Image (spheres, rainbow, N blue to C red):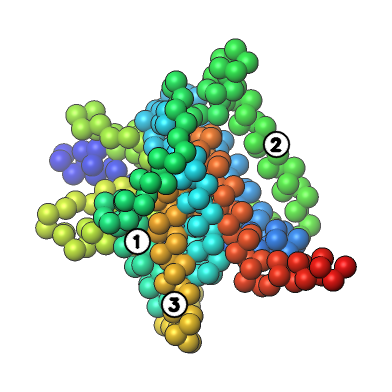
Amino acid sequence: MDAFEPKFFLIAGALVVGFAFGAVSRISGFCMRSAVIEVAERRPARQTAAWVTALIVAIAGTQALATFEIVDLSTSIYLSNEMFWISLAVGGFLFGLGMILTRGCGGRHLVLAAGGNLRSWIVVTVLGLTAYATLRGILAIPRTWVESAGTVEFSESQSLPALLAAGVGLDAGMVALALTVLCVLTGLFVLLRLARRAGSFIGMIAGGTIGLLFPAAWLVTGFLGFDEFDPTRAESVTFTAPMGEAIQYLLTYTGASADFGISVIGGTLAGAFAVALLTGTLKAEGYETPGQLARYVLGGAMMGFGGVLALGCTIGAGLSGVSTLSLGSVIALVSIVAGGAVGYRLRTGSIATGAAETVAA
């Protein structure tokens, strides 16, 4: 019976969620960077549809768990009563820039690494080491400086429903339901506008499948794997901090134990590798120039540092965090998108070109 204690369900559930994420992401190419580029070029299609679908499914599923009191989201890091708003904005923007420099976020590079992409292995390693150094090493010093630069304390939490309910004098549960419905309807409106774009339907299927993994993760950590004798906060899928913790786990295996985040990393690698193997797409890929290597290392470091400041990556802050309707996570996601858009414009020369045309005019 020991094998079926809460710890077993926690690790097993994490492996299943990670495997599904890795497999679906490998098949569909699920990627925030690609979605940002589609919007920046005014041609939103498959990746935009995938992200919008994933977001509304994640929000609806997670809020359903909270409404029926299956999972207590109030203990999550995204709903604390203290919000480091400058840290979230700066971190998100840095992460977005790094995502453009390396041609993918942390989750995307984890999926590509499983298929033999050596560039992605470098990014994952640099990202993980930088994230760990930002959490517990020398980079914690600048992190605390940024966090202390701008802090807002709330009476209870930074939950958008709670904040709005307090402002208008309504029940927080009703406000949460109304906000969830509004998010879903807005998402459906966007998807209807994208319905005729090439590949949008495939993107919706992939995004819907990935979106379901986030409430599934909350269910695993907050219900199936919850141990009342050793209670821990509920969490969902995120990659920035767990990448650093996974590296530390590999280095100190005999004195450490795998947790949910580390197990999701392992499951993601396994799922993406299985798809690459079955589809015959396993392929070793390296760097073409030293400059490319430098750019990927810089981008990986920016994502590691920025992801910790923003309390997550495109997956952690963007889907897990926003699914809780956290104000801080919304700030982080908007900042990531803004950083990605600016980074893309700088990479393609669009900003410089536009400025030159304005001067000439």
- Of callouts 2 and 1, the N-terminal one: 1
What amino acid does circle 2 point to? Leu
| Residue at the outermost left position | 254
Residue 22 vs residue 86, the one in the foreground: 86
C-alpha gap between disc 3 and disc 2: 43 Å
Q: Secondary structure at mark 1?
A: helix
| Residue at the outermost bottom position | 288
Q: Is residue 322 visible?
A: yes
| Residue at the outermost right position | 361
Quadrant location of the N terminus? top left
Q: Say which residue appears at 16% left-offset and 59% top-offset.
A: 253
What amino acid does circle 1 point to? Thr
| Residue identifier under label 2 | 185
Q: Give the answer, above or below, for where 139 lies relative to 285.
A: above
- Residue 48's x, y, as percent? 66, 56
Does 280 sit left or right of 259 as displayed? right
Q: Say which residue appears at 26% left-offset and 48% top-offset.
A: 259
| Residue identifier under label 3 | 294
- Residue 80's x, y, as percent? 41, 31
Q: Say which residue appears at 26% left-offset and 51% top-offset.
A: 136
| Residue identifier under label 1 | 130
- Residue 223's x, y, as percent? 34, 33
- Of callouts 1 and 3, the N-terminal one: 1
Of tags 3 and 2, which is closer to the observer?
3
Does 10 sit left or right of 352 as displayed? left
| Residue at the outermost front position | 359
Q: Secondary structure at mark 2?
A: helix
Give the quadrant of residue 50.
Answer: bottom right
Q: Secondary structure at mark 3?
A: helix
